[in-house]
Amino acid sequence: MTIPHFATLEVTLESHVALIALNRPEKANAMNEAMWHDLHAAFKWVDTTPSVRVAILTGNGDIFCSGIDLSMAAGLQKAIGDDSIGHQSEKLHQLILSLQDSITSLEKCRKPVIAAIHGPCVGGGLDLVAAADFRYSTVDTYFQIKEIDLAMVADVGALQRLPHIIGEGYVREMAFTGKCLTAREADAIGLVNGFFDDPGTMMMRVMDIAAGIAQKSPLALRGIKQVLNYSRDHSVADGLQYVAAWNAGMLVSQDLEKAAMSIFLKEVPQFRD
């Protein structure tokens, strides 16, 4: 199987675990136009490649992500320029939707996505990890909704996803003030599932967690993610109806038989991709 190559990402695959690393360390992993496109393509690859069962998102270098590349922001006017204000606004609207799609690709990906974060996670970087299924960080990590300091409204996901993760009050404080949230604070309010002293220790733990997930039924993993995402955005009653319909169609499977047999035989079941 061919591993895709991207200009701004480093991708590896081992034992059903895809490692996707932001790879602009000389630019603090700032998100330029190419990275937005690469992220969308990379998580589409994760979603559609049967041998990938779980993905880890991390960053090369000392900084996880410093947010949108300022050179991209500086070129915005040229990208949307038009003599008609209406057409200019329409172009900007379409551009924002395109950037949102890149972030949402993590959420739409049917495989579990774990974010492993070290150092600053600012602006677009926070939007990005908010779309992951869960997150770990190093003790020196901090999180910031930076847009208020640029006289902007964050528009690619943090304001929509973070309230479901950490609650309205914390998000509103971060968004209105631009305050930095430390790793310890993030751990206390559930933004991260834990933090570690250094990136090496964190990655060892995250790889171990991913390896454990990769041994589970891929069919069940995909179902759990889709049911959780649906349930988050709908009422409890709607969510219960959805999972009932899902299991009515998917519960009886070879994976179920293998899982039951493995308990009896006390061995690790082998599932098809």
Image (cartoon, rainbow, N blue to C red):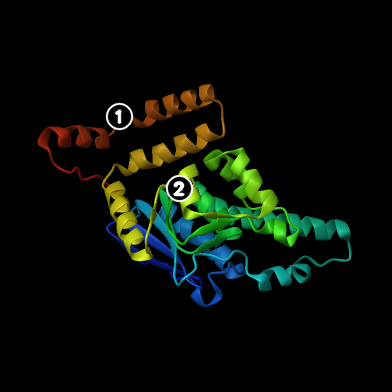
Which residue ends up furthest to the bottom in the rendered image? 26
Q: In this view, does 85 lie to the left or right of 192?
A: right
Q: Residue at x 30, y 29 (%)?
A: 252
Q: Is residue 132 visible?
A: no
Helix, strand, or loop for circle 2? helix
Q: Earlier in the sequence, mark 2 or mark 1?
A: 2
Residue 42 drawn at (x, y percent): 47, 61
Q: Which residue lies furthest to the left in this view?
A: 265
Name the residue located 62 percent from the left edge and 53 percent from the top edge. 100
Name the residue tied to disc 2. Answer: 187
Other-residue count near label 1 (Cα within 10 Å), few / some / many at <14 / 14–19 / ≥20? few
Q: Which amino acid does label 2 sit on?
A: Asp
The residues bearing labels 2 and 1 have C-alpha atoms spaced at a distance of 38 Å
Picture coordinates of residue 30, whole percent (x, y): 57, 69
Instruction: Write the residue at 89% across / 66% down.
Output: 83
On residue 137, which mark appears? Answer: none
Side (left or right) of 221 relative to 88: left
Q: Which residue is drawn at 55% across and 39% down?
A: 164
The percent position of residue 134, horizontal first and vertical second, equals 44, 47
Q: Nearest the camera: 252 or 221?
A: 221
Q: Which of marks 2 and 1 is in front?
A: 2
**Crowding at mark 2 (Cα within 10 Å: few <14, some 14-19, many 20+):** some
Q: Tell me, yes or no, whether the two marked residues, 2 and 1, touch with CB atoms within 8 Å.
A: no
Question: In the structure shown, which secondary structural element does the residue marked by tag 1 occupy?
Answer: loop
* Near-viewer residue (28 or 181): 181
Q: In which quarter of the image is the N terminus?
A: bottom left
* Label drawn at residue 252: 1
